[in-house]
């Protein structure tokens, strides 16, 4: 299971979004959060494991994050929740706009360390929001991939039944493993909270830290070969009039809004 | 330099794809390109209709099997290698993202998803797309060809397909070389209903400021009484205060109502993307510094639930009576 810890972009002030920066916006001081789709993916994997455990089948769960040390608190949480291995791959260089490099690292980890036959991750993450990483991982591994997954249930040892949103509706499909599943707007959207007992019991479990070289990935070289590079940033101007409607009470304000603006709009609908 | 727009008739939503591709080719693309459309279809498709929808005059027809993206990628890879096409253009959405990414990988090209616009240079493709959860627009340079680009979902508003005098360049049948598939027992079921959001003329959106499930339900009930469609922000859906199919924004529905009332949402760009086409936006939020206040046409600084319930009473009595 792969996840990314990202800055909470909503915590930045408007003045912090500086256009013209070629290599991204300064976000080091902003609090970190789990990418929402990855959070769904991590919980979905736990539920898959729970379901299999009920059938007497053990499903080993590995968690991997690519990036800096900000992932470590989450990796410890995942240990407490029952993940068997928690690892991260460090990179000196920012991989924010380098989906191909990220995918190389994940695919190498799966091939060389994890040896799993199911990769579950979020369908996209910021700041690049490319949505390409799951498909690139699948291509590198030679596996099929489904994106916008909202439900997974195990059928047999090597088959899962998946529900995913496609362009024209909801598709249910049975998929042979190995495969890559990219989680979208799943109902399962929050990662469960471990008990204090579980946290204490597993607090000494070691987080494995790899470099790109450990996995046979020359990150610097792959970054230079990235065929799509960020060249600059532009601000987005969204401001409208923002007329503040006056009044003393909610009833009074609602009346002013209706009379001054809404009545004429609604009468034309 | 040649380009190819991909119209995937093997999935539904061909009209929306054509609208998006056509709008993008007219207004989103700058450059001197000779364009054609690769139309994928299968036995049950209305082939004539698909040709009519093609956003370029020149059309190639490729017969394949429904819902076999891995086979489509193989076909497109062969086309890229034999035809010398520099730019492949895909409609937005999961299928476009998959095809663009896989094609770029297999041809050692470059991929960019959700493009807002592109400019074709002699050596590079310059693309703009939303980044940082829609807080900013990034300018990207694509070097290696073919350039495989899927376009932003905002181009679904691209207008009706233009009527063109099409001519068929070629027609091939690829159904004989399908091979095996890892997918079994495919079943397309009705999606959760989001049509009321996308088509709504009057929309109420509840945000995390509603406070709890009860607050969201009260806003939903007020919306119903006003005759408005009801949507929510991502934090509301993630807290299970409303169903995911009510989600408005980048990962949900993009609406273009005449009137949109946003209640208790800060107006994060990912949400705002879903309502920015609204003709008139009302923000109801106690925080004057919330972005939604600046980005609305009118704002009420107050408790959202109380305001929207008062509005429902007035509208029910004076408009819907």
Image: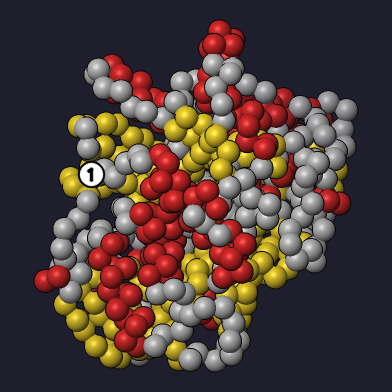
Residue visible at 70% across and 40% down? A8
Q: Quadrant of residue B189?
A: top left
Q: Is residue B277 visible?
A: no
Q: Determine whether A9 is above or below A85 in the image.
A: below
In the image as oriented, which residue stretches furthest toward the top? Answer: A197
Quadrant of the frame with the N terminus of chain A = top left
Residue visible at 30% across and 19% down? A53
In the image as oriented, which residue stretches furthest toward the left? Answer: B176
Q: Is residue B173 left or right of residue B251?
A: left
Residue visible at 26% across and 43% down? A177
Q: Is residue A113 visible?
A: yes
Packing grade of label 1 (10 A; few <14, some 14-19, many >=20) is many
SS at circle 1: strand
Q: Is residue A179 left or right of residue A214?
A: left
The chain that hosts pointer 1 is A
Looking at the picture, the colour scheme in use is: secondary structure
* Residue A116 locus on image (x, y percent): 35, 39
Residue visible at 73% across and 68% down? A232
Q: Quadrant of residue B163?
A: bottom left
Q: Determine whether A45 is above or below A132 in the image.
A: above
* Residue A225 locus on image (x, y percent): 56, 70
* Residue B171 locus on image (x, y percent): 21, 84
Marks counted in the figure total 1
Name the residue nearer the viewer: A114 or A2.
A114
Name the residue nearer the viewer: A79 or A24.
A79
Pointer 1 residue:
A176
């Amino acid at each position: 299971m792969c996840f990314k810890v990202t800055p909470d972009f909503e915590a930045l002030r408007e003045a912090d979004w500086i256009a013209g920066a070629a290599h991204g916006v300064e976000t080091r001081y902003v609090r970190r959060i789990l990418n929402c789709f990855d959070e769904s993916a991590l919980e979905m994997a736990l539920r898959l494991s729970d379901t299999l455990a009920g059938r007497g089948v053990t499903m080993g769960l590995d968690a991997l994050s690519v990036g800096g040390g900000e992932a470590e608190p989450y990796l410890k949480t995942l240990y407490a929740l029952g993940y068997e291995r928690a690892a991260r791959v460090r990179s000196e260089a920012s991989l924010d706009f380098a989906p191909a490099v990220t995918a190389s690292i994940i695919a190498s980890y799966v091939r060389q360390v994890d040896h799993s036959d199911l990769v579950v991750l979020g369908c996209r993450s910021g700041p690049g929001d490319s949505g390409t990483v799951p498909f690139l991982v699948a291509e590198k591994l030679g596996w099929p991939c489904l994106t916008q997954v909202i439900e997974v249930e195990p059928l047999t040892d090597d088959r899962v039944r998946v529900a995913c949103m496609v362009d024209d509706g909801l598709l249910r499909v049975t998929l042979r493993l190995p495969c890559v599943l990219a989680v979208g707007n799943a109902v399962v959207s929050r990662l469960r909270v471990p008990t204090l007992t579980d946290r204490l019991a597993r607090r000494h479990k070691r987080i494995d830290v790899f470099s790109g070289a450990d996995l046979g990935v020359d990150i610097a070289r792959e970054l230079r070969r990235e065929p799509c590079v960020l060249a600059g940033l532009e601000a987005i101007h969204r401001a409208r009039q923002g007329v503040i409607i006056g009044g003393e009470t909610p009833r009074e304000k609602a009346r002013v809004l209706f009379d001054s603006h809404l009545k004429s709009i609604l009468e034309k609908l | 330099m040649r380009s190819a727009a991909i119209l995937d008739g093997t999935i539904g939503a061909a009209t929306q794809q054509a609208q998006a591709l056509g709008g993008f080719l007219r207004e989103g693309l700058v450059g001197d390109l000779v364009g054609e459309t690769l139309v994928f279809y299968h036995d049950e498709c209305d082939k004539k209709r698909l040709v009519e929808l093609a956003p370029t005059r020149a059309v190639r027809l490729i017969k394949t099997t429904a819902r076999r993206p891995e086979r489509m990628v193989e076909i497109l890879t062969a086309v890229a290698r034999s035809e010398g096409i520099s730019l492949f253009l895909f409609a937005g959405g999961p299928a476009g993202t998959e095809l663009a990414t896989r094609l770029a990988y297999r041809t050692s090209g470059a991929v960019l998803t959700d493009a807002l616009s592109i400019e074709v240079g002699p050596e590079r493709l310059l693309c703009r797309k939303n980044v940082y959860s829609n807080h900013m627009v990034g300018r990207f340079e694509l070097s290696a060809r073919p350039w495989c680009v899927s376009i932003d979902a905002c181009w679904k508003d691209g207008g009706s397909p233009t009527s063109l005098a099409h001519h068929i360049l070629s027609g091939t049948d690829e159904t004989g070389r399908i091979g095996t598939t890892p997918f079994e027992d495919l079943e397309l079921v009705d999606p959760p209903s989001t049509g009321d959001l996308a088509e709504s003329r009057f929309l109420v959106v509840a945000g995390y400021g509603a406070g709890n499930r009860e607050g969201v339900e009260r806003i939903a009930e007020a919306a119903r009484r006003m005759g408005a469609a009801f949507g929510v922000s991502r934090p509301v859906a993630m807290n299970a205060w409303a169903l995911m199919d009510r989600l408005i924004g980048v990962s949900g529905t993009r609406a273009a109502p005449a009137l949109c009332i946003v209640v208790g949402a800060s107006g994060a760009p990912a949400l705002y993307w879903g309502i920015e086409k609204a003709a008139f936006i009302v923000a109801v939020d106690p925080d004057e510094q919330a972005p939604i206040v600046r980005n609305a046409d009118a704002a009420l600084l107050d408790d959202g639930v109380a305001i929207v319930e008062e509005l429902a009473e007035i509208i029910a009595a004076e408009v819907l009576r």
